[in-house]
Amino acid sequence: MKSDIITKFGANKITHQDIDSDEFHVVDYTERTMSKRAVEVHCVKPANVNSLKISNPTKLHVTASVFKPQWFIGDEGEEPKQCECVIYPTIYTKNSWILFVEIKDCKPSNASNYYKDVKNKFIVHVKLFRDKGIIEHNKVVYAVASFPRKGKTNFHNHLIKATEWKQFRDKHKIMVKGTNAITIKNETSLS
């Protein structure tokens, strides 16, 4: 998958990090550093900042492709809404999982203001990958919305209602989850 992403978008617009540790963390420093730093992936939890924790108990070798600011500009010069990164098994097959990640490092009281925006970003970003031929149109993908400053690790029912979750799964082939912690079960599934 990494080579497809590079071919379709260019090597200078996305950074790729290979990971095989039993845990890693996705952190968005953009707001806290006034854009001096952006999204980063760490194998050790960074001090003084909350993150999306991804447990990898089987130490599956995965790749995190992090999108740089303005990494994609459309034909009309517009910058579509985009996620922070996409994560996938380094040895990718048609049965492998794909995880799109959106992080909102906002005050917990403001989180609900971003729920609709986050879900729209998933739709736009996954569609872009489908339209570019990186992932198949009928492939079901995972999408995690993380609000790291929220004290609870799982706020899924606030982000997306059961009927809306089913619509995302059926219409857009996206399984959305609102959480600050997720586990890689194996090459084909997450929990």
Image (spheres, grey):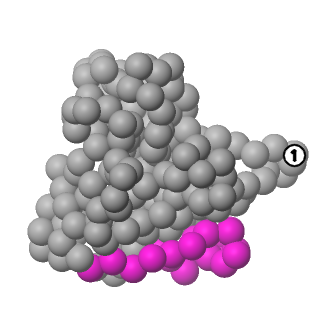
The residue shown at (46%, 60%) is: 86
Task: Judge whether residue 140 can be spotted in this image.
Answer: no
Give the farthest residue toward the right. Answer: 76
Q: Nearer the viewer, residue 136 or 80?
A: 80
Q: Amino acid at mark 1?
A: Glu
Say which residue label 1 marks: 76
Is 11 left or right of 167, judged from the image as shown? right
Give neighbour class at mark 1: few <14, some 14-19, many 20+ (Cα, 10 Å): few
The residue shown at (81%, 44%) is: 78
Residue 135, position in %: x, y? Answer: 48, 61
The residue shown at (34%, 48%) is: 50
Q: Nearer the viewer, residue 136 or 51?
A: 51
Residue 20, position in %: x, y? Answer: 26, 79
Q: Which residues are magenta?
A: 1-20
SS state under label 1: loop
Residue 51, position in %: x, y? Answer: 35, 51
Task: Judge whether residue 151 can be spotted in this image.
Answer: yes
- Vertical order, 121 against 43 (above or below): above
Residue 173, position in %: x, y? Answer: 39, 42
Q: Nearer the viewer, residue 160 or 126?
A: 160
Total labels drawn: 1
Residue 44 part of the magenta segment: no
Q: Tell me where residue 24 sits by quadrant.
A: bottom left
- Vertical order, 153 against 187 (above or below): above
The residue shown at (48%, 33%) is: 106
Q: Nearer the viewer, residue 145 or 26?
A: 26
Q: Tell me where residue 129 sits by quadrant.
A: bottom right
Q: Tell me where residue 91 sits by quadrant.
A: bottom left
